[in-house]
Amino acid sequence: MLTDTYGRKFSYLRLSITDVCNFSCNYCLPDGYQCGSDRDFLSVTEISRIVATFAELGTKKIRITGGEPSLRKDLPQIIAIAKQTPGIETVAITTNGYKLLEHIDSWLSAGLNSLNISIDSLDPRLFNTITGHNKLPHILKGIDKAFELGCTNIKVNSVLMKSFNHQHMNYFYDWLKETPVTVRFIELMQTGDNTSFFNEQHVSGTQIKDDLIAQGWQQKIRSQTAGPAEEFYHPDYAGNIGLIMPYSKDFCKTCNRLRISALGKLHLCLFSDSGISVRELLQSPDNTMLKNEIAQLLTNKKSTHFLHDKLVGATENLAMLGG
């Protein structure tokens, strides 16, 4: 398995297949998607070679991200390729849910194991204010359909914002009473484009964690391929709560994931100074050079993301790499 100079093992790849997003969330793309490069995204063949190479290096989990990955019509084919790759145990996707209701059946048929949907508020009006789309009822119907089709590993991501959903967290708690999903509250992260918004809206997850424990929520043990969330369960609730706190102490200590951008660049961290192109090595059917290059590049991975120092690297917005 891939291991860096700090002893961290990497069994999880976040694979972006497009940087295009059709939402205009106030914390990410408030002016909507702006095309900043040639939209020459990874082909299915290139994606297949990336997945196979990382599987040979010990990767067990692939998360398909964007932008919004469902904007690619070949998404079911990409899911199937990942699922059928020897060594890959879990194929997940993170989506805004816009096309969930219409396409969840094809995603599950292709082999999808885990579904993450971004929902920053359960108040339809506030959801519209945050995302620029009045789609909450449609997305919730998509989640219901996913349950009906047998998908049980469903997570909902909600970015915490002081003047927005932080005041309405009880909506999520009430929903979790009867709904067996995991709602993950994510601390707003500073990027190159959102400094003023971050300073106005950032909420620390530490107090939320203390409140959960005081209310009888208990922390779950994290699996080897799990993401960075600290998850909690309560005997009186059907669902769970997760907290992603990138500004907490030792957040990077358990890092287990690498990222490939939709343009074929390896990102050692979401907030690295730049991605390193490995696309030219995808043109060969022999994965040896690509494997050696990834292993060598991993020796440059830093011990932390340096967010505490207000250093956000080349990350202008979260849509660039799907978070």
Image (spheres, grey):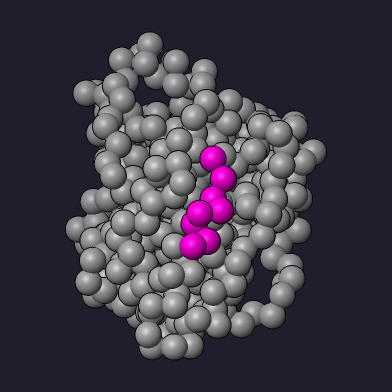
| Principal secondary structure, stretch drawn in magenta | loop
Q: Is residue 188 above or below residue 101?
A: above
| Left or right, 266 with reference to 199 | left
At which x and y percent is residue 131? 62, 52
Q: Quadrant of residue 86?
A: bottom left
The reply to whether residue 87 is in sight is yes
The reply to whether residue 166 is in sight is no
Residue at 55%, 82% (x, y): give it: 280
At which x and y percent is residue 143? 35, 54
Q: Is residue 281 above or below residue 147?
A: below
Q: Nearer the viewer, residue 51 or 193?
A: 51
Q: Is residue 166 magenta?
A: no
Residue at 52%, 18% (x, y): give it: 207
At which x and y percent is residue 230? 39, 32
Residue at 44%, 21% (x, y): give it: 209
Q: Is residue 248 above or below residue 100?
A: above
| Left or right, 210 with reference to 274 | left
Q: Nearer the viewer, residue 101 or 182?
A: 182
Residues rendered magenta in the picture: 296-303
Quarter of the picture containing the N terminus is bottom left
At which x and y percent is residue 74? 42, 81
Residue extending furthest toward the right? 196
